[in-house]
Image (spheres, rainbow, N blue to C red):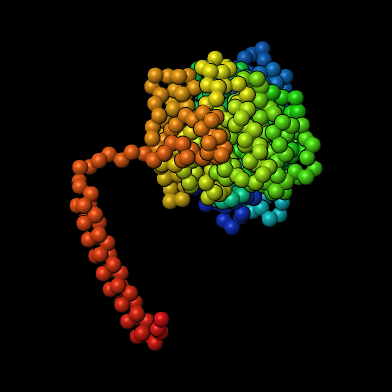
Amino acid sequence: MANGTVNGSIGFEQQLWQAADKLRNNMDAAEYKHVVLGLIFLKYISDAFMEKHKELVSDPEADPEDRDEYLAENVFWVVPEARWQYLVDNAKQPTIGQIIDNAMIALEKDNVALKGVLPKNYARPDLNKTILGELIDVLSFNIGDRISQEMDVLGRVYEYFLSKFASAEGKLGGEFFTPPSVVKVLVEILEPYSGRIYDPCCGSGGMFVQSSKFVKEHAGNVGNISIFGQESNPTTWRLAKMNLAIRGLDNNLGQQNADTFHNDLHKGIKADYILANPPFNISDWGGDRLVDDQRWKGYGVPPAGNANYAWILHLLSKLSENGTAGFVLANGSMSASTSAEFEIRKNLIEKDHVDCIITLPGQLFYATQIPVCLWFITRNKGGNGHRNRTGETLFIDARKLGTMEDRTHKIFTDEDIAKIAGTYHAWRNKDKHYKEEKGFCKVASIEEIRGHEYVLTPGRYVGIEEVEDDGVPFDQKMTQLTGELSEMFIKSHELEDEIRKRLGAIEYEF
């Protein structure tokens, strides 16, 4: 694929991944991730620079090597030794690792926004330099004449590679990546057209990327959203910074990685939209050092052995007067019965903060098989131009939705997402199209939730879906079913006898 041209509509991410993954050999996915994603980022920066460079070359009054010409248009300045073509020209050199490291160092030196972000360990002895050169060759594709095309493609390639690395890493991969279809459900429900968007555990920044896509798809201005977040893992924080830079999204993720509970980098923020996928059921979050924290005031102190409810109260504390938060939690959060969690959940419900609860199907996440749900909480159920839904909570059971993407992972289709988000919006806006669907959605009052002892599991409220009568009498169905079952029992006994015979032939009995 070296220096080849591909169609801007792209369907080549998988082909590109297969070519890059083939070069991985025995390298651990978690390590290889930074090698590949760092190079994709370097190509993006270089390609954006070269488009502006080409423009300046054609202008007789401009200097294509004037750094200020680039910075004036928010284009990163790239020295000649850090440009992609220089890497291509030297890809077969044994010093290619050091050349890449020097390029990363130069980029950070010349661009303050990238300081401390880029990987700079390509020269290490255990990284095969032949493979590194071949990887540069694989990534040397050309989309077309405009970086606006290339930027979108590279962004999609970066996102696709993130998902594949998350899958390859299994449980650890989920710490930096939330499946796009789950993020899209959150975004389509919250509709972050403009205002402050916050994520206190932002991983690789997928919530922000999907929010920007939503704004663009609805003919909005991405400049109208402000991105705030933080991430405790240093390498994941760097991934997020690169991911957002590739998308051209200004952001405030702090000057470094930091633990949200103990080093909140955005103490004064009040967000209009919060999207988050906090780590599930964390037991060592240091809760015993935060007993008197202001975030718990009026609701209760979260248990030191599980951070789930600490996340809920932290997110609530960050909401603006009309803000709404949507986030992922383990299903146990809907019915946790420890005295501390029960007390907090009761207060959240009685103070009317719980807007909507959605249970999700299994196999959506790379990191865990734990069943998960989406929470939506708000400070004002009548605010932000929507109808007054005080005292109401919408429950949606989406466990039967989703399509298997491969043998182990499921995704929501666009139709699934439209059904979930459409149901929420129809209820929130009192749309004439909203109707309760047995087994799928139901609106419950605080009094009704109180009657269920503050358990928020949607199944308690939506009931069981009605099955259409096929007209076959019950007695006839039972006769057919018992006949089929009888045949299965006979076959089962025949198989059992055959197995015993075969084991007996080799002098084994059971």
- Nearer to the camera, 505 or 492: 492
Mark yes or no: residue 388 visible: yes
Residue 200, placed above or below residue 471: above
Q: What is the quadrant of residue 385 in the picture?
A: top right
Q: Residue at x 34, y 80 (%)?
A: 500
Q: Is residue 61 left or right of residue 145?
A: right
Quarter of the figure with the C terminus: bottom left
- Nearer to the camera, 314 or 338: 338
Q: Is residue 314 left or right of residue 189?
A: right
Q: Is residue 318 left or right of residue 367?
A: right
Residue 123, placed above or below residue 148: below
Q: Residue at x 67, y 15 (%)?
A: 62
Q: Residue furthest bottom?
A: 507
Q: Residue furthest top?
A: 61
- Nearer to the camera, 61 or 246: 246
Q: What is the quadrant of residue 293 in the picture?
A: top right
Image coordinates of residue 33 in percent, x first then y, are: 61, 46
Image coordinates of residue 141 in percent, x first then y, are: 52, 36
Q: Residue at x 43, y 36 (%)?
A: 462
Mark yes or no: residue 216 visible: no
Image coordinates of residue 260 in percent, x first then y, are: 73, 36
**Mark count:** 0
Q: Residue at x 60, y 31 (%)?
A: 349
Q: Is residue 431 left or right of residue 350?
A: left
